[in-house]
Image (spheres, rainbow, N blue to C red):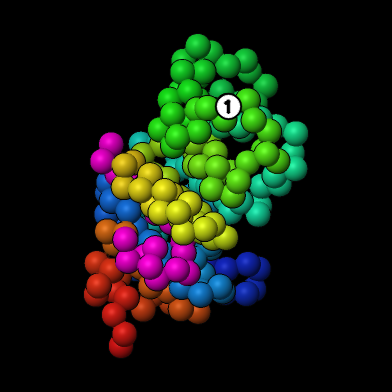
């Protein structure tokens, strides 16, 4: 991306972001609330049009965007399998019946993040970590090379956070590029690449030990 600017109406949020996202690696967008992380994710996902600058994508599929758990009500009367199946809507639309291939993809994605045994469980029955893994599986079901996640480990205990970060590493070994927004410097330090944001501006980018080093 080059000189990307974006905002909401007349309110600017991103100011001239020029950065790159390395392929098949974990990148962390790091910054406090209000730094522009979610807006930048939206720009990368193609759901938020920039007001200026350019974004070049080398991926053939549409990016998969995984929202924060708080944006997806856990009170919905849905099972884990049905929630993951929503990821196939990007290919078939919500009105079409799932094919044998779709069902196989859904099962594979649940197995990949370790929730296959929870397929019939209701969302309200899940722990925070199980719920987050369900949303990640939904993103994977879109079969994209680029997985974008907004604060995926927020509110989870340390064990659940560690499992989420381990899943990211496993995904990159299969060729998937992972970009996640976080305000947790410990989580960011486990990424391969970091973009440090403050008030909509890019302060640093590169390996965590360099990008997150105190100025």
Residue 87 location, quadrant: top right
141 is higher (above) or lower (below) than 10: above
Which residue is identified by label 1? 119
| Residue 148 locus on image (x, y percent) | 45, 50
The structure residue drawn at horizontal position 66% and vertical position 47%, both measured from the top left corner, is 72
The structure residue drawn at horizontal position 61% and vertical position 32%, both measured from the top left corner, is 80
Q: Quadrant of the N terminus?
A: bottom left
Residue 62 location, quadrant: top left
Q: Nearer the viewer, residue 132 or 26?
A: 132
Q: Nearer the viewer, residue 163 or 6?
A: 163
Residue furthest toward the bottom?
Answer: 215
The structure residue drawn at horizontal position 63% and vertical position 67%, both measured from the top left corner, is 8
134 is higher (above) or lower (below) than 116: below
| Residue 213 locus on image (x, y percent) | 29, 80
For label 1, the crowd category at 10 Å Cα-Cα, with few meaning under 14, some 14 to 19 and many 20 or more, is: some
The structure residue drawn at horizontal position 58% and vertical position 54%, both measured from the top left corner, is 68
In the figure, is residue 95 to the left or right of 109?
A: right
The span shown in magenta is 172-190
In the figure, is residue 23 to the left or right of 102?
A: left
């Amino acid at each position: 991306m080059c000189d990307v600017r974006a905002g909401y109406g007349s309110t600017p949020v991103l100011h001239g972001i020029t950065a790159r996202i390395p392929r098949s690696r974990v990148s962390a967008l790091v910054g406090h609330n209000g730094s522009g992380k979610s807006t930048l994710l939206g720009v990368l996902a193609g759901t938020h049009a920039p007001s200026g600058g350019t974004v070049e994508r080398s991926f053939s599929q549409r990016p998969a965007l995984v929202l924060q758990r708080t944006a997806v009500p856990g009170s919905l009367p849905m099972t884990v399998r049905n929630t993951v199946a929503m990821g196939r809507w990007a290919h078939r639309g919500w009105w079409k019946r799932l094919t044998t291939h779709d069902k196989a993809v859904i099962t594979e994605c649940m197995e990949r993040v370790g929730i296959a045994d929870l397929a019939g469980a209701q969302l309200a029955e899940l722990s925070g970590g199980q719920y987050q893994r369900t949303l990640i599986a939904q993103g994977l079901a879109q079969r994209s090379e680029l997985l974008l996640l907004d604060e995926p480990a927020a509110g989870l205990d340390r064990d659940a956070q560690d499992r989420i970060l381990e899943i990211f590493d496993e995904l990159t070994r299969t060729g998937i590029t992972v970009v996640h927004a976080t305000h947790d410097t410990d989580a960011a330090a486990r990424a391969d690449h970091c973009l440090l944001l403050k008030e909509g501006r890019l302060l640093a980018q590169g390996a965590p030990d360099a990008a997150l080093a105190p100025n």
